[in-house]
Amino acid sequence: MEQVRDALATDRAVQHDVLGSFAACSKVSSDTCLEEISRAIGGGHFLADKPDNPSLSAMSIVLARDGHVGRVPNADPWLAVLKGGRGPASDALRLAVARALAREAPTYGRALKTELEARTLLRIVGATIPGACATYVALGEGIELKTMKPEDTPDHSACVHKDLSRREGPGPR
């Protein structure tokens, strides 16, 4: 876990040596792959709802190396780690998310003026924040509103409303 954190804090060559030693994960195989990496690090099962150190390290590796976070059902435990987690695995996750967002900063680091720009931001959020709302992911992947189930649209999605009501969120407006 310390090697993962330290690799993410250094240059690309070191990252490749450390992160490249684990199985590569496609978005399709991310569930199985996160499990494999968690076990290879010395943990048990990959824990999406209450991430332990091997799970945090596995997520960090997949995000930093493969450019996505897979599909975990709930952002809350991951956001809690990003905000206040302690130790090398929590640091690794923060570094992986920060690096991923920094890579995308030229794309989202300005006012959004078009629907395409907003969808691009949603794609970035879905790819970089573990447990990001499935509605964001779908819209970021180009799914049209008219083809979505009513309960999954932004106006009705439970996870969108939860994010809007967060202390840091903009509220229902």
Image (cartoon, rainbow, N blue to C red):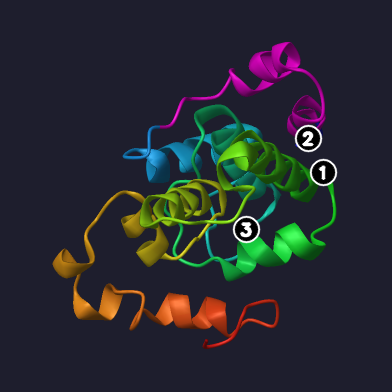
The stretch of residues the image draws in magenta is 3-25
Q: Which residue is mark 1?
A: 88
Q: Main secondary structure of the magenta part?
A: helix
Q: SS of the residue at dot 1?
A: helix
Residue 148, position as x, y percentages in the image: 20, 68
Q: Secondary structure at mark 3?
A: loop
Whole-number angstrom distance, CA of label 1 to CA of label 2: 6 Å
Callout 1 amino acid: Pro
Amino acid type at mark 2: Arg
Please name the amino acid that badge 3 sits on: Pro
Decide whether residue 125 is among the magenta residues: no
Task: State the residue position of label 3.
Answer: 51
Residue that label 2 marks: 5
Quadrant in the picture for the N terminus: top right
Give the farthest residue toward the front: 113
Mark 3 → mark 1, Cα distance in angstroms: 13 Å
- The label shown at residue 150 is none
Q: Is residue 5 magenta?
A: yes
